[in-house]
């Protein structure tokens, strides 16, 4: 009888713990059907106030992330934010910034660029982020790109050199390379040949030849970015995944610090909103066992006596754009529920509104009671946003 009583008491205590755990999670989440929801706006403002950096980690290929970024930017403007940092290289970012600096023709110019060089700018070959870029331009904001050159972007980089350099010798050498890169891209898409793009023809011998023609460090830096991206991609193709991700992270940190140092000439502690893949935004070691740009940013904020805010925006289900010229179809359905922690699954069951928002900071005191999957999310991000019935980004059209 005594043993039976102990078993019952243990069961009751376990049940009470589960109820308490579920309640504390419910106490730190809410839902919203629109981003303009007063409750969501008030919550985001309370989180953004007193920060130097906002890092939005996205699921690529869905419309809603761009809209969330736009809302964060609009709120951030009130607190001194005006710079958006994106997952492109500096030339792609500069190209976007320049195109949208002329409001009357920006959308047309953006479409014409895509017509000329399809898929040259990763993640932004779509109609839906035009509103975001135009909004930044309207606020006279800046766009920073800190990633590597995209593997099918050599066309755009060569074009940039031809249009922005006065170095006749370098331009003469680049001109036939642009023609070749355009032909290689066409061949790659038509044959679905992943190894056809010009990146694989950018040899060390060619690189050194072009370097000797440079008149400035800026020209050399552009060419060095092409060499670096080839090395990073080759690590991936050779299955050296740690080296691939670690070298990419180092490049992102260096590119960011170059922008940041220049910005500090005018502002003591410039504020930056980041829009990157969710793995790049994780605090601590990420999924690839790398200390990514997120750690540099969070430590820099700490040094400056400020804070960084890390947000993850993930679709629950819906449609996404693959953003890949080699994909058989551009838009595919997805369902992420199999990858969500049980604590999230319990709270999206029967979800009627578009967004589920979880404030993870208060949950860190009970991480020992959470599933391992939930514990990781709670420790790595400050806010989790789950999105129901996502819409795919719409491709810009080509002839």
Image (cartoon, grey):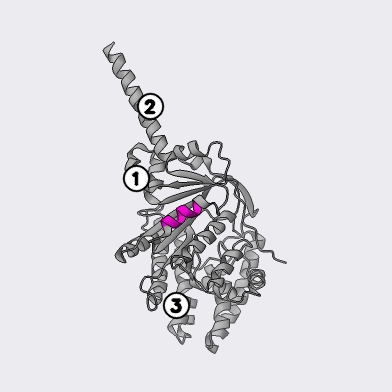
Rounded to the nearest angstrom, the CA distance separating label 3 from label 1 is 43 Å
**Residues at marks 1 and 2 touching, judged by CB atoms closer than 8 Å:** no
Upstream in sequence: badge 3 or badge 2: 2
Q: Can residue 62 be seen in this view?
A: no
Tell me if mark 3 has few (under 14), some (14-19) or many (20+) residues whose alpha carbon lies within 10 angstroms of its own. few
Rounded to the nearest angstrom, the CA distance separating label 1 from label 2 is 21 Å
Question: Which residue is found at the position 53% from the left and 65% from the top?
Answer: 151
Question: Which residue is found at the position 41% from the left and 51% from the top?
Answer: 381
Quadrant assignment, res 136: bottom right
* Residue 357 versus residue 54 in the image, above or below: above
Return the x and y of residue 396 as percentages of the image width and height. 66, 63
* Magenta range: 40-47
Q: In this view, does 234 lie to the left or right of 163?
A: left
- Is 379 within the magenta? no
Query: Residue beneath label 1, please?
Result: 364
Quadrant assignment, res 5: top left
Closer to the camera in the image, 48 or 228? 48
Which mark, by number, is residue 221?
3
Kindly report which numbered mark, 3 or 1, lies closer to the viewer in this rendering. 1
Query: Residue beneath label 2, please?
Result: 15
Return the x and y of residue 274 as percentages of the image width and height. 46, 62
Indicate the secondary structure of the residue bearing disc 3.
helix
Indicate the secondary structure of the residue bearing disc 1.
helix
Return the x and y of residue 75 as percentages of the image width and height. 49, 61
Closer to the camera in the image, 51 or 349? 51
Closer to the camera in the image, 178 or 27? 27
Indicate the secondary structure of the residue bearing disc 2.
helix
Q: Is residue 93 left or right of residue 47?
A: right
Rounded to the nearest angstrom, the CA distance separating label 3 from label 2 is 61 Å
């Amino acid at each position: 009888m005594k043993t039976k009583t102990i078993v019952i008491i243990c069961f009751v205590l376990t049940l009470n713990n589960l109820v308490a755990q579920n309640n504390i999670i419910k106490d730190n989440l809410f839902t919203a059907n629109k981003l303009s929801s007063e409750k969501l706006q008030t919550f985001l403002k309370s989180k953004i106030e007193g920060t130097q950096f906002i890092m939005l980690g996205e699921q690529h290929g869905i419309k809603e992330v761009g809209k969330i970024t736009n809302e964060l930017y609009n709120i951030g403007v009130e607190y001194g934010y005006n710079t958006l940092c994106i997952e492109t290289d500096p030339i792609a970012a500069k190209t976007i910034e320049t195109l949208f600096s002329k409001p009357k023709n920006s959308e047309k110019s953006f479409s014409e660029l895509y017509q000329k060089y399809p898929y040259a700018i990763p993640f932004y070959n779509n109609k839906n982020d035009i509103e975001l870029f135009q909004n930044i331009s309207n606020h006279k904001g800046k766009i920073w790109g800190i990633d590597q050159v995209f593997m099918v972007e050599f066309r755009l980089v060569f074009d940039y050199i031809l249009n922005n350099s006065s170095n006749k010798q370098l331009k003469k050498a680049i001109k036939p390379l642009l023609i070749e890169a355009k032909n290689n891209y066409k061949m790659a898409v038509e044959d679905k040949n992943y190894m056809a793009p010009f990146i694989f023809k950018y040899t060390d011998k060619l690189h050194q030849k072009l370097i000797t023609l440079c008149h400035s460090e800026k020209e050399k830096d552009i060419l060095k970015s092409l060499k670096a991206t080839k090395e990073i991609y080759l690590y991936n193709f050779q299955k050296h995944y740690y080296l691939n991700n670690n070298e990419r992270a180092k490049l992102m940190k260096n590119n960011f610090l170059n922008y940041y140092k220049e910005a500090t000439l005018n502002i003591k502690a410039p504020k930056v909103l980041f829009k990157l893949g969710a793995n790049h935004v994780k605090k601590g070691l990420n999924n690839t066992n790398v200390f990514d740009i997120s750690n540099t940013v969070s430590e820099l904020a700490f040094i400056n006596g400020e804070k960084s805010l890390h947000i993850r925006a993930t679709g629950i289900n819906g449609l996404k754009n693959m953003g890949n010229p080699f994909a058989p179809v551009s838009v595919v359905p997805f369902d992420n529920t199999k990858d969500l922690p049980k604590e999230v699954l319990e709270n999206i069951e029967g979800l009627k509104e578009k967004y589920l928002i979880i404030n993870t900071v208060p949950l860190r005191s009970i991480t020992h009671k959470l599933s391992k999957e939930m514990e990781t999310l709670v420790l790595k991000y400050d806010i989790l946003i789950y999105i129901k019935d996502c819409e795919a980004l719409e491709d810009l059209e080509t002839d």
